[in-house]
Image (cartoon, rainbow, N blue to C red):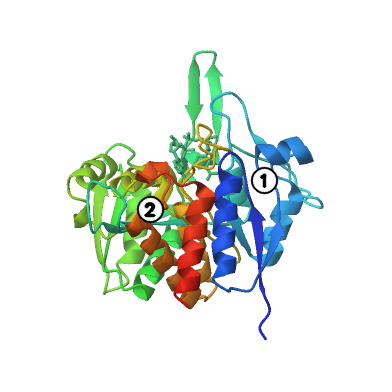
Amino acid sequence: MSAPHDIVLLPGDGIGPEVTAAARLVVDAAGVDVRWLPGQAGLEAAREAGNPLPEATVDAIRRHGLSMKGPTATPFGGSYRIEFEAAGDSSAPRSYPSVTVALRKELGLFVNVRPVRNYPGIPSRYRDVDLVIFRENSEDLYLGIERMRDADTAEATKIITRGATERVARFAADYMRRTQRKRVSIIHKSNILKLTDGLFLEAARAVLEQTPEIEVGQRVVDALCLDLVMQPHSYDCLLLPNLYGDIVSDLAAGLVGGLGVAPGANIGTDCAMFEAVHGTAPDIAGKDVANPTAMILSAVMMLRYLGEGDAAERIESALSTVLADQSSVTPDLGGTAGTRKMADAVVENLIRSR
Ligand code: NAD
């Protein structure tokens, strides 16, 4: 008998505990042998453990190589930072603008993969959208290097390196080869940010053009936004620097039914962390109305990463049935079911299809 998969489970804040519980329920019901290792991150962790990102959490993910994470809260504005100091590490403590950014950096999760596609029954402006977003995850304005130059002047530093750009482009090319994707557009604003975005465009293009079966294009980010809302079918894969990747992911989620249905994966050389695109949704937290679809689809991505393709297919198919039937979906999808009821309906379909 093979060993169980060890997965560090971070429920996170707001709706995080509700949607991660739903995803866990579904993965277990699919018969995948998982040992869930509870971990803490976020404001709940700060309250309970005195630290929004306990070192034990980062260590556990490094050791086991895998995490399923709920969203974690980051206060807007002000001077909130995560100070991370690893034991035995002689370098100065590192400081990050949010728990998620800290985890991505500490674990070397250099790419955020965000598939965007329609599912049956989900009300949306378009049908048959099928995009994959590759967001560079380690640099750009997300390094959070900001300062007040004087009392009335704030400054942020944008960093783009050839190494990080080539790394994410190589990942995108490899992913596209494996999944038989044919076209990628490099997204930038190099007409204005000539050095930073200019380097991103040039370095990414040089790598992607080494794969003859991939057609490589480019688009400035503002024109891309217009195209996506007018004609999303004209794109296949998008490769973006960190900040544009974040913004365009939410826009793209809006094309296929909203944040409740947009999954994601953060992948590095030795580790991976799976989380939905959405945040903690404080407006609906604790009410059992959060849509678990994005988290369940993130778990589906995680199972594929683990080589559990059969369980991933079965979960995706059971979820599609529930979405199409619409009698057990959450209010954002036009239904009246709660998070738990929707997860139970997916489980029932999984069991029925065995
Ligand atoms: P949000 O994604 O939490 O919410 C935006 C809107 O979408 C809200 O109206 C919310 O109710 C709705 N929504 C989100 N997820 C939903 C779901 N599963 N089902 C139904 N409706 C859903 O974005 P925000 O309000 O900008 O951010 C709230 C907090 O989340 C902030 O502290 C932010 O920093 C944090 N955040 C964390 C992550 C992460 O941990 N990866 C990502 C984004 C935002």
Q: Is residue 65 above or below residue 80?
A: below
User: At which x and y percent is residue 136?
Assistant: 45, 52
Q: Residue at x 17, y 45 (%)?
A: 230
Quick check: marks 1 and 2 in contact, CB under 8 Å? no
Task: Name the image quarter holding the N terminus.
Answer: bottom right
Whether residue 83 is visible here, answered yes or no, is: no
Q: Residue at x 46, y 72 (%)?
A: 352
User: At which x and y percent is residue 92?
Assistant: 73, 42
Q: Is mark 2 within 8 Å of ligand 1?
A: no
Q: Quadrant of residue 98?
A: top right
Q: Is residue 103 above or below residue 315?
A: above
Question: Helix, strand or loop at disc 2?
Answer: loop
Left-right relation of 75 to 49: left
**In this figure, which residue is indicated by the disc labeled 2?**
327
Distance between mark 1 and mark 2 Cα atoms: 34 Å
Left-right relation of 69 to 216: right
| Label 2 neighbour load within 10 Å: few <14, some 14-19, many 20+ | some
| Label 1 neighbour load within 10 Å: few <14, some 14-19, many 20+ | many
What's the residue type where badge 1 is placed? Ala
Of residues 8 and 349, the one drawn nearer to the viewer in this rendering: 349
Q: Nearer the viewer, mark 1 or mark 2?
A: 2
Left-right relation of 303 to 11: left
**Of callouts 1 and 2, the N-terminal one:** 1
Instruction: Count the numbered circles shown.
Output: 2
| Residue 41: assigned label | 1
Whether residue 36 is visible here, answered yes or no, is: yes
User: At which x and y percent is residue 124?
Assistant: 27, 47
Question: Helix, strand or loop at disc 1?
Answer: loop
What's the residue type where badge 2 is placed? Ser
User: At which x and y percent is residue 322?
Assistant: 39, 59
Taking the view exactly as shown, the residue that stands out farthest to the right is 88
